[in-house]
Image (cartoon, rainbow, N blue to C red):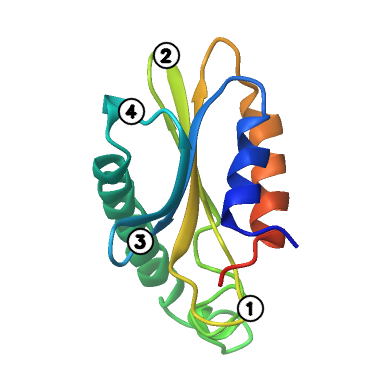
Amino acid sequence: MPGIDESLLEAMRLPGARGASVVDWISGLALGAVGDAPGGDAEATAAETAELARLATESGVLALTGGEDATGETAGDGPGGPSGKEPPVQDLIITNADSYHLLRFVTTTFDSTVFVHLWLDRSEGNLALARIRLAEMADRLVLG
């Protein structure tokens, strides 16, 4: 099972990859980074993307904790809700004129607050392939 460094190097082998990082979205700190960062500062990029991740997860949790469904369960009680193993948001895709930013949340047996950020060149990258490979990579990632 690959650790952070091996996973980041694997991400950089994707077509069009400019940079990748593993970020803790609570603290905004990069746990590891490789390649370039938008704006040239990996720590500033980590803090900015962590803010997006926090907003997305808070919105996802709020959407999942709405009313009861037809079975009488609240949306947040089932798998995929805050009490399940799956995060309320799996990934975020941000598109710019010349690039894609893909943030994939890492699911672990404990309450993970980590995501992988991949920065792709829009003309060389394949967003669909990157999303699939990043999901596979995040599932194998060993934090420790």
The amino acid pointed to by label 1 is Pro
Q: Residues within 10 Å of mark 1 (few under 14, many from 20)?
A: few
* Residue identifier under label 3: 25
Farthest top residue? 123
Residue 28 locus on image (x, y percent): 29, 58
Q: Which residue is mark 1?
A: 79
Judged from the image, the secondary structure of the residue bearing numbered disc 3 is loop
- Residue at (60% x, 74% y) in the render: 108
Most foreground residue, 13 or 60? 13
Point 43% across, 68% down: residue: 113
Horizontal side, residue 29 vs residue 3: left or right? left
Neighbourhood count class around disc 2 (C-alpha, 10 Å): few under 14, some 14–19, many 20 upward:
few
Across and down, in percent, residue 12 comes to: 61, 32
Rendered image quadrant of residue 66: bottom left
Residue 111, numbered label = none
Q: Give, as a three-letter code, the residue at label 2.
A: Asp
Q: Where 83 falls versus 61 (above or below)? A: below
- Toward the viewer: 72 or 138? 138
Q: Give the mark nearer the N terminus: 1 vs 2.
A: 1
137 to the left or right of 40: right
